Image: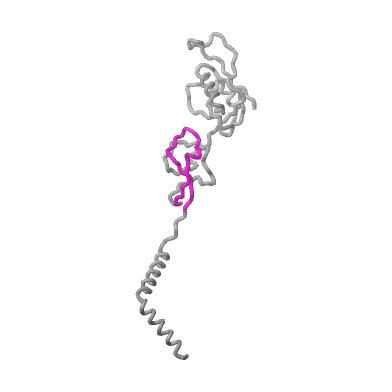
Amino acid sequence: MTDAPYRHRRGLLRLLDRYRRPVAAVLTALAAIGAVLVLRPPPEPTTQVWVAARDLDASGPLGESDITGRTLPDRLLPEGVLTPDDPPTGLVPNAPVRAGEVLTDARLGTPPAAPYGPDMVAVPVRVSDPGAVALLSPGSRVDVLAARATDDLGGPPTRAGPAVDVVDDRPVLAVPAEDGVTGEGGALILIAATAEQARVLAGHATGSRLSVTIRG
């Protein structure tokens, strides 16, 4: 019985001697793998962002088919990137965007008339009376009136006629400050209107003097 431990030890030594080379190879491979894991730098941080799914122009707001998500290294990202928590659908590019370009807050903007409805556009209107425009501020609501400024031959009208309503109860989006002489007189306001109302206003702008009445 006392020889049993020695027999087992001799058997283990013979087994190790038989497989010495495979065991050494396995240990060497494990050591190499351990060294690589120790020396390899940790993965760099990344962020999922929105990029343009195709070439985009600045003709209208972005839809879901215009954008796609992509995970990129943080070191490559500019300031103001838009993340999945901040989708850019509904925003409008302020310039053409190439496919794959990272979308940032500086490249996109909210259409100024969007708060008043999806079918609204921003329309500049030159009002003949700058004093009336001085009473306006963003949020004011106005009616726009038109009176003929020329006769059929392009001269001044021979008889003043009544002003006609062009659009009613339109919100003022902005009262732009104009530096220098524009050569057109009056003062400019920006209102929200439908596309059809914008066409009517454009038709009156060339041959009529536009004025406003203030609702509030």
Nearest to the observer: residue 184 or residue 30: 30
Q: Position of residue 150 (x, y in %)?
A: 51, 13
Rendered position, 86 above or below 60: below
How many marks are shown on the rendered structure? 0
Rendered position, 75 above or below 58: below
Rendered position, 78 above or below 4: above
Colour treatment of the image: one colour
Q: Residue at x 64, y 25 (%)?
A: 215
Nearest to the observer: residue 183 or residue 94: 94
Can I make out residue 187 in this image? no
Q: Position of residue 13 (x, y in %)?
A: 39, 82
Residue at the extreme top: 158
Q: Residue at x 50, y 40 (%)?
A: 64
Q: Position of residue 32 (x, y in %)?
A: 38, 68
Residue at the extreme front: 1
Would residue 6 be counted in the magenta stretch? no
Residue at the extreme bottom: 2
Rendered position, 7 above or below 70: below
Residue at the extreme left: 21
User: Which quadrant would the C terminus be assigned to in this image?
Assistant: top right
Q: Residue at x 62, y 22 (%)?
A: 213
Q: Position of residue 129 (x, y in %)?
A: 57, 21
Nearest to the observer: residue 184 or residue 198: 198
Say which quarter of the image contains residue 170. Answer: top right
Can I make out residue 169 in this image? yes
Compared across the picture, whether 51 is left or right of 192 comes to: left
In the image, the segment drawn in magenta is 46-73
